[in-house]
Each structure stands twice: as structure tokens, then as C-alpha cells.
Image: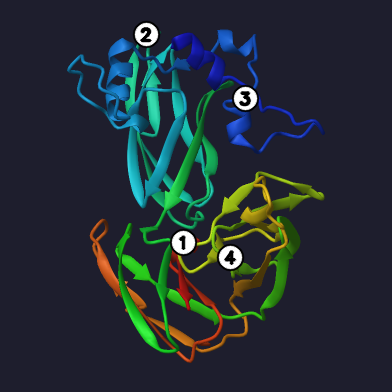
Amino acid sequence: MSVKSAMMTTASPTKTTDGKNSDDVFAQGAGEVEARAMLRPGLVYDSNEQDWLAYLEGVGIDTGTGTKAIDPSDLNYPSIAIGELFGTQTVTRTVSATTAGTYRAKVDLPGIKATVSPSVLHFSHPGQKRTFTVKLDVTTARAGAPDTGSLTWTSGRTTVRSPIVVTPQSVHAPAEIKGAGTNGEVTYSVTPATTDLVATAYGPVSSPLFKGSLTGTAEFDHETNIPAGTKASQIAVHFDLAAGNIGGLVWGPMVDGVLQTIQIAYPDSSGTATISVPQPTAETIFVAVVALDSSGSGGSGGSGDAVTPYTYQVNNIAEDSPVTGKVAVTPDHARVTPGTPTDLTAAWSGAPADARSTTWIEYSNGAGTFLTLN
């Protein structure tokens, strides 16, 4: 583990095919090993079998050893990773010196306030150990999106760099709540990560419907552009399926005309398949509306000409989107206790009765909940 630490903390940025530094931390890890630098690491993060048993217990694996579990983020590893940074969290690390020196800490992590304590470590001889903590507080980092950076200890010309990856969360809230009718309200529970809870409703947006039909086993392809400034997007396709037939959506983002990772959305009990995209990037979304006619898909004697009507709707919600009706959330601003659930009520009026409308209820740092009506 000491050797691995030396390799990681002295690595250089991984290059992409165009020669630039990679910005994908999941592709580059700590970076490319520098054979000469790794022999002079300055500090190393060491760990033993007991540490790893405690880590395994912490991720839910029963090792049968009786070892006490630790938070997985507290494994004495040369990097820092927090799968969900819910408001604030403190991690602990211990470093061992390979040479004497005084090291000063610096953290580069956009949108996160980082406090290293102590921020200066003095080592009078090799082999000495020092323990420190790093407290991370979410400030402006976008909720739900991986945030990457580094912790660097510096002594003269020696630098010891640890990559950091955290996924900030400002609130635990349902991804979607539903309602029906032109007027109504729904109460739901959220758990804030901070003492200040803000909830702002954008919408309801109800875009025009596209009506189409599929004959037999067929698909129809739609390319939907998500404009810049969109806070949330919801694509809904309602199928009028014949008994025994199957419908659904195959979709994914388009990059340079190439379909990326494919996802599938199936109709619910009402026959509507939904794609909900919070905090979307401005891009083109490819959507294939698919129907499988059971009468002609492998059986004998089937005509294969059943018609499946469908309606296609795209609700892109931005701060200045035209709205149909009104939605208000109460309380829209409240002092709350971090980690303690609290109730919010979303009330709407004037929503269209014959078409779906979508509202984005936004909390801090871009987190939010879809309110889907009708």
C-alpha cells in the first residue's frame, strides 16, 4: 500500500488523444505513473489487512472476523471518494514521512468548502506519522453531479497529490410526485442537508402534442433538442396498445451524430412511457417510439398490421418557459434541521385536463423533484 500510494500521489495527468489533460476522473484515476518521482514520494498513505477488513465491513460485507466497520470514505487510501456528500462530511487520513520536512495542505475542489486540520504537518525524521482530517461542506457544487479535485501537501519541491471525487447532495427528495385534475395539491416529505430549505416551482409546462401511429412491428424516430438554460426535461409518449402488444421507448443522448448509451422506458399502467431528465445539458436526445405487434411477431396466421396510435410530448422547463396554469410550493423557504424530514405541499391550479403538464420543483444546488400532472 505504501508503494501504491507513492505511485498515485506523484502521478501526472493522463492525456487524451488530442494531447490535453483528461477531465474524466473515472477514466484517469490518479493519473500516469512517473517512475522517477514515485521513488521520492515524501509522504505515503499506508494501510494493512485490518484496515481493509474494516472497509469491507463498512460496505456491508460480513468478513466473519468481528472487525468493527468504518465509513468506507475513511479507509486510509491515497485518494478521497464520497459517493454521497450530504451537506457535510469529515474524512480522516494518516500519512507517514519518507523524508523529514514541513508540509502545507491545499485543496482544490470547486463548489466545496474544504477545511484541513491541521493544515501544516511537521516531520523531524522518516517513519513519523501524522493524522489529519478534511471537512468538506457543499457550497455551490451542483447536486447529483460528480465533483472532482485534489488535496495536495507541499514541502519545498515535493508535492503529494491525492485526487478527490465527491457527489454532492443538498436534499433527499422524491424524483417525481404525481397529481391529477386541473386543481389540487399533494404533500410530500424531503430531508434537507442544511438549515435552510428553499423550494421554487418552475412551470407547469404543457407543450403541444405530436400524434402518430405505428403499424405492425415498427418504430418511429424522434430527435429532440434540449435548449440551453433548461432546468429539467420530461418526454412522455402515451400508447393506445392493442391487447397483447408491447410498446416502449429506446433513447439516449446524441454526440456528433452518434447515439450514446441506450436506455429503455416502458409504459406504466396508463400506457404512458416517460423520460425524465433533471439538470440536462443542452444536447440532442434521440427517442425511438417502438411497438411490437404480437399478431405478427413470430406467431402463425397473424396479419401483423395492428395499428398503435400514440401521442408524443416534450416538456422542456426553463426559468422563462411559458406556463399553463400555476404551481406554488409551501413553505417555499424555511429554517429546518439538517437530516430531519420535513413536509412540503405543492398546489396547482389551471392545469390542462386533456394533456400532461410538468413542473420542476427546484431546491438548492440544482436538486429537484418533478411534479407530473395528468
- Residue at the image point whose x is 73% and y is 57% from the top: 218
Which of the two marks, 4 or 1, is nearer to us in this view?
A: 4
Image: 247 above or below 95: below
**Residue indicated by mark 3:** 31
Q: CB under 8 Å between callouts 4 and 3?
A: no
Secondary structure of the residue carrying tag 3 is loop
Given residues 314 and 271, the one toward you in this image is: 271
Q: Residue at x 36, y 32 (%)?
A: 73
Marks 4 and 2, Cα distance to the nearest angstrom? 74 Å
Q: Secondary structure at mark 2?
A: loop
Residue with the mark numbered 1: 367
Identify residue for label 2: 127
Q: Amino acid at mark 1?
A: Ala
Depth-wise, is mark 3 or mark 2 nearer the camera?
Answer: 3
Question: Which three-letter amino acid code belongs to the residue tagged 2?
Answer: Gly
- Residue at x 54%, y 56% (from the top left corner): 266
Q: Amino acid at mark 4?
A: Ala
> Can you identify the residue that label 4 sits on?
242
Residue 234 visible to an observer of this rendering? no
Q: Around disc 4, counting alpha carbons within 10 Å, would you say few (fewer than 14), some (14 to 19), or many (20 or more)?
A: some
Q: How many marks?
A: 4
Q: Nearer the viewer, residue 354 or 140?
A: 354
